[in-house]
Image: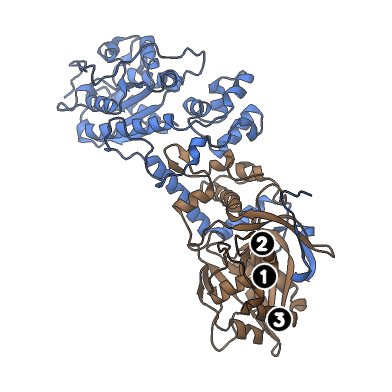
Amino acid sequence: MITGAEAEARLLLPLRSPGRQFESFTAAVRYLDRPTLFENRPTFRLLEAGLSSANPRLRFSLGTYFEMIDVSQAVGYELASAMMAGHPLSIDQLAFRSLIGDPFDLQRRPTQIAVNALTIRRDPRSGTATFVLHWRDPTKVAIGGGLYSVMPVGVFQPSTVDPWGQRVDFDLWRNLVREFSEEFLGMPEHDGSSGAQIDYEMWPLYRTLTSARDAGRLRVHCFGLGIDPLGLGLDLLTAVVIDSDVFDAVFGDLVRVNAEGHVIANNDPNTAVGFPFVQESVDRFTKAEPMGPGGAACLALAWRHRHTLL
Amino acid sequence: MTATSAYAAPSLSAATYPPVQMDQRAKHDEGRGSHGRESTPDGPWRVFLSHTSDLRDYPSDRSFVAAAEAAVIRAGQAVTDMAYFTARDTAPADHCESVVADASVYVAIIGARYGTPVRGRPDLSYTELEFETASALGLPRLIFMVRPDSTLLSAVDQPNEHAERQEAFRRRLMEESDVTVAWIGTPSELELSLLHSLMELRHELSGPTYTNNLQGLRKERYLAQRRVAEACNVSLNTYSLWERGKRLPRPDNLHALAKAFSVQIDELGYGPPSAADASMPSSSSSPQAGPPWGGATIELPVAIERSQGKWRDVRRYLASNGARLTRTAADLYRHAMKVEPTPLLTREDWMTAEPVDLRRIALDWLDGQQGK
């Protein structure tokens, strides 16, 4: 398996002492260019995906965040470096990318999935909807800095290092609720570094959102899985449609700035929170603004399936 | 102004001038780039100082050549065969070649004077001949060019033809690949700059060895080093450093090497870093070892700063051009399906036909241990 320690990747690493390179991308990032959030944590490693059938499934094992970063940052760096040097670009010119080869081969490199959720506030009375975006601050996050993204976005990972807790956290909905808590409410992240396992059933936010979901007033739609071609990271594409009364009750105190960047919610007190979910704003963010490909795909797919979603 | 004859070999005591064995060179048929460095990793290098005779006496208080010699000695290395220069300007070409061939590093101090043409070779000066010999041998070449505006270099009395030839030689040195060219104005600048270059070179040559299989691949194919160097569009010196593992090829070089040997990049034999590389220093810029004289007059980590600076530049570029780079990356996977209009790659069985409730997606657990 590709680890980022191959000769092709080592050539992309800076020197740390005379004649010696850093041994991994994460080591270099940690010492030379550390973003605010940069900790190694256990993650769920995706091994296999089949989503088109009547029984969609994802198969996982355990991995670590840095394993994935070592590969994805190096492959992105390689392309940027070649672009800066003005080299003609083809896979053949990019030694490390060539070594990785088929991006759909999940056995070949460490993987994890980022659950991209486009949050749509739906007003059943007026029949209108709005959505919220996030601008990821490059000084705060390791991936996708300087781009708009949907929110919340979170790596599918355990909230704890406790092995039993890891089983409890092996649940996409629970992962999503943790990200809502962090990105919408600015609550300290359940970041996987804690030794304590979350008692979901006793967590008010979890109970509120789960009962809204069970009552059909919050729906999570999944569109599929994609690959960001730059760093070859995997994005699970979803939209969370929340009825306005639930949204306002839970996220009325939407934060403006969270640990990962700025919430771009168009917070005019006279209008509903977020951008209007209309062709114009969808086109703007999927075509004109710098937006991460996972988020843009969520937005494009949500618009394509708007009649199902709303 | 132009003293040309008052040359005197400097007297160096044995205490400051380490003994140099004349016969340290391994007797290779090829790989002449290896020279004394390889066979005597701990002994001093023999540094060949190429210059026109005027620079030995000028400026009169402390000449350029005297400053260069001081730098070589401060760096713990040795100046090659001083006696050579007393008779050089009448020596036949093959004698000059053999003296250069005894050196492990070539250093040239290039002023405005062209100098004497080689006996029997009126088209070539001794300095040019020495440069060409060093290049052919694959010696590391350090060039110090006296700045044209240096007040120390005014009014050289030489035929117009020589002035033109010297101008052409200087231009050529600037354009030569894999040559380190530094500009200097005064002897003190030369001393500092040469000392620095020698220290950098020492670190380059005494750094880690990147194991590889280049020599094996080359010999199996009966190729000369020069042939492979040409195929990769690098100098013989650079190729020689690759083969000895003293320098890492860049990614584009790796492709050229694989092509030259008709193998996959894997087969070039670049393995994981050696165990010594695994430790992390508390400060990334601390030098590994002090200079031999124990002083700290010169900052060593210039190469490190340059490398880390470049790395940061690329990261900044990456951070501020994410969207554009993502599009470019998507174009590399021309045949992959995309989530239009975005550059996100996907495939048929990764997409749901209609949106699926997240609860319907089954998560399977596969422990690495348990296998299938």
- Extreme residue toward the right, this view: A54
Looking at the picture, tell me which residue is in the foreground, A163 or B145. A163
Taking the spot 72% from the left edge, 77% from the top edge, the residue there is A219
Residue type marked 3:
Ser
A54 relative to B259, above or below? below
Looking at the picture, tell me which residue is in the foreground, B154 or A2. A2
B332 relative to B48, above or below? below
Q: Helix, strand or loop at disc 3?
A: helix
Badge number at residue A174: 1
Comes first in the chain, label 3 or label 2: 2
Taking the spot 75% from the left edge, 50% from the top edge, the residue there is B370
Q: Helix, strand or loop at disc 1?
A: helix
Look at discs 2 and 1 and give the one toward the viewer: 2
Residue type marked 2:
Trp
The color chain A is rendered in:
brown
Q: Is residue A277 visible?
A: no
The residue indicated by pointer 3 is: A211
Q: Separation of disc 3 and disc 2 at Cα?
A: 25 Å
Q: Separation of disc 2 and disc 1 at Cα?
A: 15 Å
Badge number at residue A164: 2
Taking the spot 59% from the left edge, 81% from the top edge, the residue there is A251
Residue type marked 1:
Arg
Where in the figure is residue A187, as x and y percent of width and height? 54, 74
Comes first in the chain, label 2 or label 1: 2
Where in the figure is residue A44, as x and y percent of width and height? 67, 58
- Chain (blue): B
Using the image, name the chain to which the residue with label 1 belongs. Answer: A
- Extreme residue toward the left, this view: B61
Using the image, name the chain to which the residue with label 3 belongs. Answer: A
A217 relative to B140, above or below? below
